[in-house]
Image: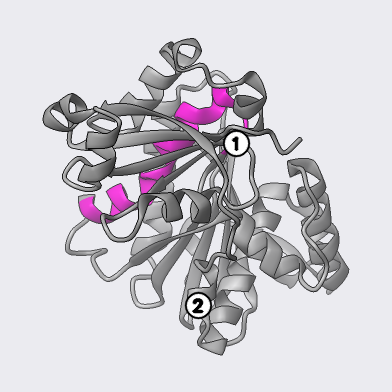
Amino acid sequence: MVVVNAKIFGYNQLGQLDLVPVKLEDIELVNKCIIALDGGTIRTGCAVIEEATGYIVALIAFEREKADESKVRFKVNFKRALYTLLSNNKNTIDRIYYEEPFIQYVEAAEALLMLRTSVEELIIENEPELNHIKYTEVPNKRWKALFLAPDKCPTGSELEKEAIRNKMIKYIPLMGKVSQDEIDAAAMGTVVVQKMKDGTEGELKSKKKVAPFQYNIAFIGAECDDDMLQELLDNVSDFKIPEKVMHNGIKIKQIDGRGKFDSKVYENMEDDDLLLVLKFSSKYHGNIILKHRVGHLAAQFPYIYALVWRKSRKS
């Protein structure tokens, strides 16, 4: 099962402002709110934030009860718990933002990709009840840069977490009592609400211009992300992807058929030096399919996954 640790800002028994534990089913929102989710293999952080004010209304940690609990069971129970929150607040929650998964450790990839589809599945499984909910993925690096501005976002996952935690606690000291996953969800949600109020929500997706670079490329045809990942991990040595690249992480992005393929590589790789996986319909980018002679993959599978990594290391 999933252990749900929910709390709201309120007054404790001493009359002091505090984070007060509540039952998930007792969270009933009065004003319009968004949900921000930071998915994790052990714990998923959730922040409920008012659209009009940016106030953090509730913080929730969805945690595995046991470390050896199966990934599938955790996902199913997570969806059940999230449904409780959504069904009790159908009139006040219509937007969910999920941090686009960045796979830093290959062994966590399967669990993270499995969790990634949870919200969309939940919406579809509960049609028409949850049809009104809009689901958006927010790029990992983008929201962090916006939250930490004008300071520069540091390099390295642990340094990023420390900077985000320190800034959040500086403004809201009580946040020192919650997990990093909840802090990350709250920070991302804070950025989202601010951009909504400014009318600049598009900036969450914007990319800075990246200078062209030479890259290696390989292809996998698959029915879904899980199948792609399994083939990648089973045959990683055959693809000749450097160990350093895999150590830096995996970023998976779905692209459409518009624009130049090279431009999509540069835009989505940004300044990173990791394995970029570009997923696209086998009906798209025929010139790339022909150039690299992977028409047999396009004929067999609905999706093509381009595995891209830099020819020259950045570090």
Residue 120 position, x and y percent, is 31, 52
Q: Secondary structure at mark 1?
A: loop
Q: Which mark is residue 288?
A: none
Residue 11 position, x and y percent, is 76, 72
In this rendering, is residue 96 above or below 199? above
Asked whether residue 199 is in view, the answer is: yes
Mark 1 residue type:
Leu
Q: Residues within 10 Å of mark 2 (few under 14, many from 20)?
A: some
Q: In the rendered structure, does residue 115 fall within the stretch colored magenta?
A: yes
Residue 80 position, x and y percent, is 37, 45
- Residue pictured at 33% horizontal, 60% vertical: 259
- Depth check, mark 1 against mark 2: the one in front is 1
In this rendering, is residue 122 above or below 174? above
Q: In the rendered structure, does residue 72 fall within the stretch colored magenta?
A: no
Which residue position is annotated with label 2? Answer: 201
Task: From the image, give the main secondary structure of the stretch colored magenta.
Answer: helix
Q: Secondary structure at mark 2?
A: helix
Q: Residues within 10 Å of mark 1 (few under 14, many from 20)?
A: many
The quarter of the image holding the C terminus is: top right
Asked whether residue 186 is in view, the answer is: no
- Counting residues from the start of the chain, the first of labels 1 and 2 encountered is 2
Mark 2 residue type:
Glu
- Residue pictured at 56% horizontal, 52% vertical: 212
Which residue position is annotated with label 1? Answer: 274
Residues drawn in magenta: 103-124
- Residue pictured at 72% horizontal, 48% vertical: 180
The span from disc 1 to disc 2 (Cα, nearest Å) is 27 Å
Marks 1 and 2 in Cβ contact (< 8 Å) = no
Task: Identify which residue, 124 or 86, lies in the foreground.
Answer: 124
